[in-house]
Amino acid sequence: MRIISLKTIKNYVEQHPESKTAFQRWAKKVEKAQWKNFADVKKDFSTADNVGNQHYVFNIKGNDFRLIVVIQFTPQFVLIRFVGTHAEYDRIPDCSTI
């Protein structure tokens, strides 16, 4: 999978260095993946959630952080839409529209 807007994560990690290793692990696994559907995502990330509108939520570092992405399975890309703490994520009214 190709990750679009990876710089969003890199900028976030600069402000939250305790998240660096966890986000690096996530990105490395995603870049190696060739997901065809959500079931493939779940095999790699059992806690991932499909929240609709091609938006998916990943728990990062034991749920300390959340990541919202748009996944396009056919062109094989993941677009970063939100990176934040669990508390910041909880303030999003509808993460399928972010």
Image: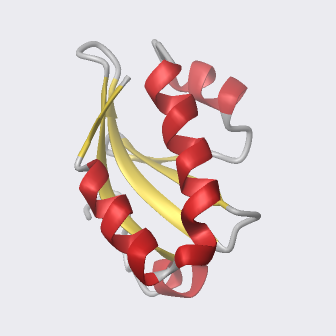
Q: Is residue 51 left or right of residue 69?
A: right
Left or right of 66? Residue 92 is: left
Q: How far across and how far down the image is residue 19, in percent? A: 59, 69
Q: Is residue 67 visible?
A: yes
**Above or below for 6 versus 33:** below
In depth, the one of 67 and 30 nearer the eye is 30
Q: Quadrant of the N terminus?
A: top left
Residue 28: x %, y % from top left:
53, 34
Which residue occupies 50% across, 20% down? 32
Q: Quadrant of the C terminus?
A: bottom left
Q: Residue at the location (74% across, 38% down)?
A: 46
Q: Quadrant of residue 20?
A: bottom right
Frontmost residue, 49 versus 23 = 23
**Of 68 and 53, the residue lying toward us:** 68
Q: Residue 55, position in %: x, y?
A: 37, 47
Residue drawn at the location 54% of the way across and 48% of the way down: 24
Which residue is at a point 41% across and 67% down the rendered structure image? 83
Q: Where residue 25 sits: x, y (%)?
A: 61, 44
